[in-house]
Image (cartoon, grey):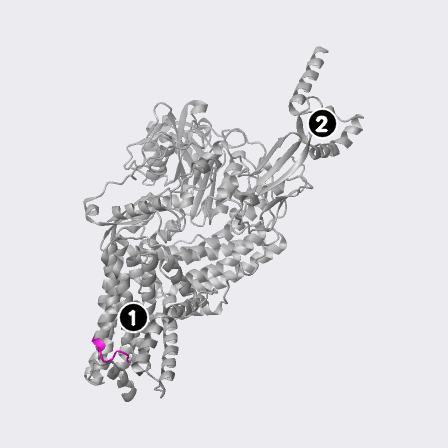
Amino acid sequence: MISKIKEALICLRAPRVTFRYPLEPMPAPARFRGRPTIDGAKCIGCGACAAVCPPRLIDIHGEGTTRTVELNFSRCTYCARCQEVCPVGAMQCTTDFETATNDRANYSVKVELAAVACQSCGTPFITQRMQQKLMAEFQPAWMQQRNELPEWLSLCQSCRVEKTGMTMGRNIKNG
Amino acid sequence: MTTAQVTMTTAPETLTKAQKILQGIQEKFGVALISAENPRPDRLFLKVRREEIRPITDYVFNTLKGRMVMSIGTDKTPVDGHYEVSYLYALDAEGIALNLKELVPENDPVVPSVAGIVTYANWNEREVYDLLGVKAEGHPDPRRLVLADDWPDDVFPLRKSVPYNFKPPVRDVKPPMRELTEREKKSTIVNVGPFFPTLEEAASFRLFVEGERIIGADYRGFFAHRGIEKLTDNVLDYNQIPFMAERICGICGFVHSACYCMAVEHAAEAEVPPRAQYIRAVMMELERIHSHLLWLGLAAHYLGFDTVLMQSWRIREPIMWLVEAITGNRKTYGLNLPGGVRRDFTNEHCDKILEVIAKIEKEAGELVAAAAEDHTLKMRLVDVGRLTPEDARLLCCVGPTARASGVNIDARKDFPYCAFPDLKFKPAVQHTNDIWGRLLVRAEETFTSIDLVRQMLARLPEGEIMAPVGNIPPWREGVGVAEAPRGECVHYVETGHDNRPYRWRVRAATYPQLQAVPYMLEGMHVADFPIIVGSIDPCFSCTERLITVDRGNANKLRIYEKKDLLAMSRRRTQELR
Amino acid sequence: MRSVLVGIFNLLFALAAAPLLDGILRQVKARLHSRRGPSIFQTYLDLGKLMVKDDQAGANNTIFSLTPIVCFASVLLAALFIPMGGVVPLGFAGDTLVLMYILTMGPLCVCLGGMASGSPYAYVGVSREIMTLMVVEPVMVMSLIASAVKAHSLMLVDCIRQPLGAGPSLSFIICGVAFFLALQPEVAKVPFDQAEAEQEIMEGPLVEYSGRKLAMLKWSFYSKQIVLITLFTEWFLPWPALESLPLRMACTVLKVLVVAALVEVIAQVFPRLKINQSMRYFVSVNAFALSGLMLAVIGL
């Protein structure tokens, strides 16, 4: 009997703790990992986020001279790995958690970036911003050693392989 | 790496515990032992001849008092033409994980069954057959366990030749029933599940009932098996799996991801910074506190005592907000990666943790004190769902279920991981063998955890929280052991190529516990059923390793219309009559 | 004239106010649970929702289909026999025993419907319901008869007026307590709601009901709850004896609220007992009620 009264007292001492959500807002804490977004002004299309995403929701594809970074967060696990690996801070997890919608298109974020063509074969292979970033990082070091930018910065992967192979072949031939 | 030959020449007094055990096995079964590895003092990986597995099992289980943890079936046929079937044992007194591996030739996929020696091996061997197609010869009940009833009989999904997104055609097959005793044939059959109000997840129990009394029970589960172990074969990489592992369970997810990371770190022989170790341990203990409070509420709900449910969850809620503020989510913390943790504690976080656990200590203390004196609650729990220490050992039960039956095992003490080697605590043990004991164990553990968190925060080391693991060479084995709120959680990783494991095996605590449920049900009332199943704090999705919707599945979904469902459910009702 | 008006009021009270009482009890429960809880009109909405939902036809037989109607009708009939403010609307047509019969009809109907549904959960629920009826009904009968013995009449009006004149006697108090203890299983509240235990047998006899039939059964349960509690307050708590009838009726409504809240609080601080445990408990309550009846017979 005493334990019953104790239980009732525990109940009555505690105030009503539930909220009137969704009638009142429930802000999430600062570190909350919510809906991910891509800042189109910052994204360089490097693809780091696509490589780490566990449910593989980030896709980089391209037609012609545009490269599209597409994020569809309908199955997002909200791990924020993309935010962690993004080198320019374009991937951001907001504190927004109310993502229910009637339209699947609302789950998609797209960023279209201009691609540069390979100087040798003409195929677009890298985004302009990516190349600028590479140059900005490599230029000072290269400029100190030689007085020009390395040629491979403007070559696509296959041309780069070909070029390197030819250089190596030439070197071998020349002893 | 210590080979079998090396240990023979070492003098007995300088031998480590693992080497002594190895020597014992060598003396008894010399030729049966093919090779032995001892990569860490607390791990022992043996390869044995499959013909000798029964005597060795007998020796390990009955003489060394080993506790079987799980079986691991690996398809190594693309590598060396063998299937590998391992039994992992925990030698709790010595704190050593002992793995017995048998090589099974591809053209003769059969191993001798050890279910006659260790009752718990029953499910393990059925699982190996279902997933890998290695048959346990002499198994007492070789029904299908893991796979769906309509899965083809000759496709074994864990074989490397089966693609991860293989979809078999739909067939109409009845679930296999077990042999009934004469008495069971005469009894009323009450089907509980697959969907039932107090089974939060899909599971099906067939209760054989005389009046109100249960005389037997049969279990069919694994409805939520989605084969996430298969996904790691060729889809996910080392750094992606923790997020998958975390979603194995909705309550003890952090333990799973930490346990996986520990297994990878062991395999890679990587050092984890001490601060990361402590952060992991603090989060695991916070998880235990909220999980036990959750259980107390659920247990009360099963008894129709919703006031305790609501109050206990009210007391628990601040922890969820706390971890949300620290990690970014109230449940899936996403904190672990092999090599450390992703987010650090700030000083404010530490203060906030201390504040929250002090409040919980006070409030939970009052609630538990009131509940512990409650006469009616005792009427429902004392001597209900009994599990004798002998059965607990044969079924290899772990966690609060085992500790309430007087089996003093706790992975935090026996296999100290993370920060636990530095901490002082006593595992809660009760000898009542019933649900009341399980309640007391969990109540005591809640307060032990609060104390442990205080100890850890008082000595939280400074420094880095992440030391990237780097490249991991293939064919290394790692075992991660951690005490989840429900009991010991074990992850096994064998490393492979392409930055992903060759085999990842998960054993959650509910796996052995569920096998004990039919033992607990016997002789009890139908009214006791929810609380008995609840008393092991079951987590079916843990056992079944649920999750992942494969993108390719979307266009091959079976879609039932309303009238189909209605017709099906009516047919089912007709069958029940 | 007066009894006709009270009759109409009783019907409305049992019919229209019953979901409101349930809504208020939900708030009481929510307060004990430290939550906000739904609005007190939620039960109306719930019933309305069930009314427009499809009937899944869990079983196709007459008994199964008729049960909700008979159950509902029996409760409404009982409402006409229940005193209100000291007036018994249909007092001329039946006495205490008739009232008891009508009140027992509801649970028996549910049992029949449960049996007809054929679900194994319903069977377990029905067997529990019948066991409960077997031990709880005698308590109610003995408690009510004790007053009849003192009043030397089975007429309802005589029975409820007797303690007003003579004051509460020892047997009256004992019977009142026994009746209150029997209220809990009669209105199907924890710890004695084994027959409908949601967690164990999924509302037992109701498991196959859906849509409008389920709504009618639920509604009749709410009505039965208000009818029984009114009976208890009128019979065992007739004070204060006010002059005007509307005041007396208002007073009764208030008392019903208080008693119902008390029943709900008790339900919230107990776990559900097992059927054998509650049987054992009610055997002693029966003995207690019997002692009350004996005392009434010897005039105490």
Q: Is residue C166 left or right of residue B358?
A: left
Q: Nearer the viewer, residue A124 or B45?
A: A124
| Residue found 57% across the figure and 31% down from its top | B471
Above or below residue C230? Residue B85 is above
Q: Is residue B227 left or right of residue C236?
A: right
Q: CA distance from mark 1 to mark 2?
A: 89 Å
From the image, state whether disc 1 or disc 2 is nearer to you. 1
**Residue that numbered label 1 is attached to:** C76
Span shown in magenta:
C88-97
Considering every residue shown, the one lying at the far front of the view is C1
**Is residue B491 at least partly visible in the picture?**
yes
Q: Are marks 1 and 2 on the same chain?
A: no
In x, y percent, where is residue B553? 45, 36
In x, y percent, where is residue C74? 26, 68
Check disc 1 and give the amino acid type.
Answer: Leu
Q: Nearer the viewer, residue B262 or B18?
A: B262
Q: Which mark is residue C47?
A: none
**Residue that numbered label 2 is attached to:** A153
| Residue found 78% across the figure and 32% down from its top | A140
Q: Quadrant of residue B32?
A: top left
Chain letter for mark 1: C
Q: Nearer the viewer, residue B205 or C154?
A: C154
In x, y percent, where is residue C124? 26, 56
Q: Is residue C100 left or right of residue B105?
A: left
Q: Quadrant of residue C76?
A: bottom left
Overall secondary structure of the magenta section: loop
